[in-house]
Structure formats: structure tokens, C-alpha cells
Image: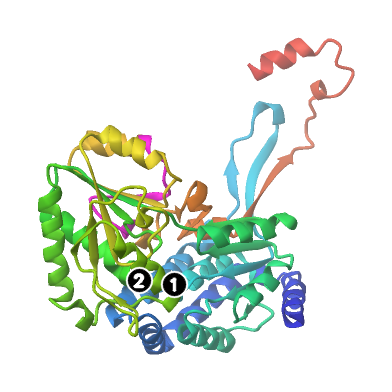
Amino acid sequence: MDNIKGILNNQKRYFYTGETRAINFRIEKLKILKRAIVKYENEISNALKIDLYKSEFESYATEIGIVLDEINLAVKKLRKWSKPLRVKTPITNFLASSCIYSEPYGVTLIISPWNYPFQLLMAPLIGSIAAGNCSVLKPSEYTPNTSKVITKIINESFNEEFIAIVNGGVEVSTALLKEKFDYIFFTGSVLVGKVVMEAAAKNLTPVTLELGGKSPCIVDKDIDIRLAAKRIAWGKFLNAGQTCVAPDYLLVHKDIKKELLNAIAKIIREFFGDNPKESHDLPRIISKKHFNRLIEFLEEGEIIVGGEHDKEELYISPTIIDNVTWENKVMQDEIFGPIFPVLEYNDLSEVITMVNNYPKPLAVYIFSNNKQVQKRILHNISFGGGCINDTIMHVASSYIPFGGVGCSGVGAYHGKASFDTFSHKKSIVKKSNVFDVALRYPPYKYKVKLLKKIFK
């Protein structure tokens, strides 16, 4: 692992030359990254097809397109984002001005997962470049073909002293986490997130953790059932359910439960045909380990749609399971697969109590045309982010921050939030020498009354 130490030392030396701080430098590097992505777009899509059986449309919509959009916004807005922010100055600092400067941390470590292996490495990298940092990238070993294309893009586009990529398994991640980086950005499971945070704490390294959890899809009786079914099924079975913000389970009002489930079943057939295994639009499970974990969930409850699976092809059909309880295995942890358990409710208070009894979810999806229902859920359940009358789409916006809360994550990114995440906010008060207030200096014997008046 001496190579890791060498890369880190070289990047630190390069960072302190000050070259990465120049705004023109950052913009040019972002443009170089964009040109490389466009150049290798077909290779990226092909790699995602091999690794995850993603269609070209899904690869572009959820991976390549999002990254290009993030680059375009950063290039357009970077000069504005990076300007010192003038803020008010209190009377206690009479004849002074106050500014907040955004400065890069230094050398950042970005560790990405396998489910969106291109987007979830490149999107944080855009923020790191925009903020003026050097970066070390660790892609997932579970998607070797995508990692190979990413490695080609990075190595052809950038010097290792600015952006370096380190491939390998758990041993490489462990070695990286032993080093003292200036910032760590991790996307992955809650379990590994705890390991990352523990390692970072030893060096007091700040972190962003993009994790997951059981994100509920809450469906009120006052909805357009077919439209809701379409949007729910799309969000759940996108990437075969291997999405950190996928609706993990369905919480549906008992009055419309049967009608909604029938509508979702119909939509599944419309999306993937009578035999989803033959569809080119349904990705596969990433590994046999995850496949084996998922099929255990099929042993409990009542399968009302799907349930078919093929271990050789790592295929699991879009599946809906009714009559489950919180004691069932499928409700113990994040599912991360095309299996959709269903719970019903009668009163909204049940929903709020139920969700709040468990760790804060990364996302909550609310399907209701009743503004009071929407407001009540938003105000009484803590979660990372979400949608009203849709799923997933909040993640596709570069204008709102994306992140978790509690066990579902620490920090946020996308758009300006990415720039802010990878920037230290340095607060400066600039004092005038024209006038000096004597009040603050000893002796204080007769000054306390005046001080109290000022603070009032």
C-alpha cells in the first residue's frame, strides 16, 4: 500500500502550490471531464450493461445525463459560488465588515458504491473539483467493467497529483481509510458508513456519508390510482430496486389497497411484459451474495405478483408481497432489490408512529392530493428528502441538496450543495483602524451597564 501513501503525499504537495485554487483552473478541469465523458459515453453504457444489465436509456438517465447536468451547472455558476459572501456585522464590531470565504479542504477521498457506479463517483468528484481540491477516487470492485472505463477517463484526463484512482477490494478501502485525508465522501451501506466514520474520527477528518435505510411510500386514499401506481412501480423497480432512495415498502390506506395493488401489477406487465426476464429494461442483481439475501425474503408473507428468480442469471422478477409485519425478515433492513412488501393503515397517526419507531429514512414518498395530509407527514416525520406524488425525482435535481439524516446519512450534495460540501467556510471580520471602541478594554469597573444596553 506504499503507492497510496505516495499518491497522497504527491497530491498534498501539489495542492499547496495553489494551482487548484484558481477558478479558471477548476472550470477548465470540469470541461475536460465533460469532454472525456462524452467521448466514452458508449463505453460507459456498455460497461453498465455488462455489470448491471442496465438499458442504454436507464444508463443515460440515471448515470451519464445526471453527471453532465451537474458539470454544466458547476461551470456556469462556479464564479458566483466562489465569491466571498458579504454578511451583516453586529454593532459590537463597529466599523468593520464581515465575509465568508469558501476555500478547498485539500485532498479528498471519494468512495463510491456499485449500484450507480458511474454517477455516484463522478457527482461528488464534480463538487471536489469545483471547490478546488485534489481527489483520490475508490470505485466499487463489484462493477469491474464500469470501474475500468472510469479509470481510463481519469488517467487520460488528469495528472495523478490532481486526481488519482485506486482500484481494489476491501483491503484497499481499509488502507485508504488509515491515511489522513482532509475530507472523506462515502456512499454505501449504513454498516460500512459506521466503519468510515470511525476511521475518520481517528484523524478528526470531516465526512459526508450518503447511506440508506427503509424509505416508506405512503399512499393516501385521495389519489389518482393509475398515475400513482405508475410512478411507484417506476421508482421501486428502477435498477431492479437497487437504489438507495427506492421506495422500500408500501404503506397504503386500507380503503384503496386492493385497487392500488391491482394497478401496480398491471403497470409491471406494461413496463416489463408478461415475462420480465425477457425484458431489456430490468437490470439484474449485482452478485450471488445479494441474490441469496433477497430470495430469503420470498419465504414469508403472500406473494401476489412475481416471485420468480434465476440464480444463474441473478434475476428476480418485480415482486409484491402482502400480509407482512415488522417482524418479517423483509422488514428488518433495507431491501435493495425488486421486492416490495405491503403494509396497510387506517389512520394517518398510525403511519407517523410506525415510521418514527424506526431509524430516520433517507426518503419518504407521499401520495395524496390532500394538503393537510401532506403537511402533517412533512412536519411529523424526519427524513432526508423525498417527493409528493412521485418517487426518486428529487435526486435528479441539481438545485436542491440531496442527503440523509440520522442513520440515513450525514451531509448533502448536488449542485451548489456539492461545492459547499467540499469547501471550508472561513469567516473573516475586517476591522477599520480609523476608530477604536474603548469599551472592550480593561478596566471594566464602570462599563457593564453600557455593555448590557448594547446587547439588548
Residue situated in front as seen by the camera: 389 or 125: 389
* Numbered range of the magenta stretch: 380-394
How dense is the environment of label 2, judged by Cα within 10 Å: few (below 14), some, or many (20 and up)?
Answer: some
The structure residue drawn at horizontal position 28% and vertical position 56%, both measured from the top left corner, is 341
Q: Position of residue 194 (x, y in %)?
A: 59, 56
| Residue bearing the label numbered 2 | 62
User: Would you say residue 419 is visible in this rendering?
Assistant: no
| Amino acid type of the residue tagged 1 in the rendering | Gln
How dense is the environment of label 1, judged by Cα within 10 Å: few (below 14), some, or many (20 and up)?
Answer: many
| Amino acid type of the residue tagged 2 in the rendering | Thr
- Answer above or below: position of 302 versus 288: above
- Answer above or below: position of 87 versus 260: above
Would residue 294 be found to the left or right of residue 419 on screen?
left
Q: Are marks 1 and 2 in contact (CB under 8 Å)?
A: yes
Q: Position of residue 270 (x, y in %)?
A: 12, 71
The structure residue drawn at horizontal position 67% and vertical position 56%, both measured from the top left corner, is 198
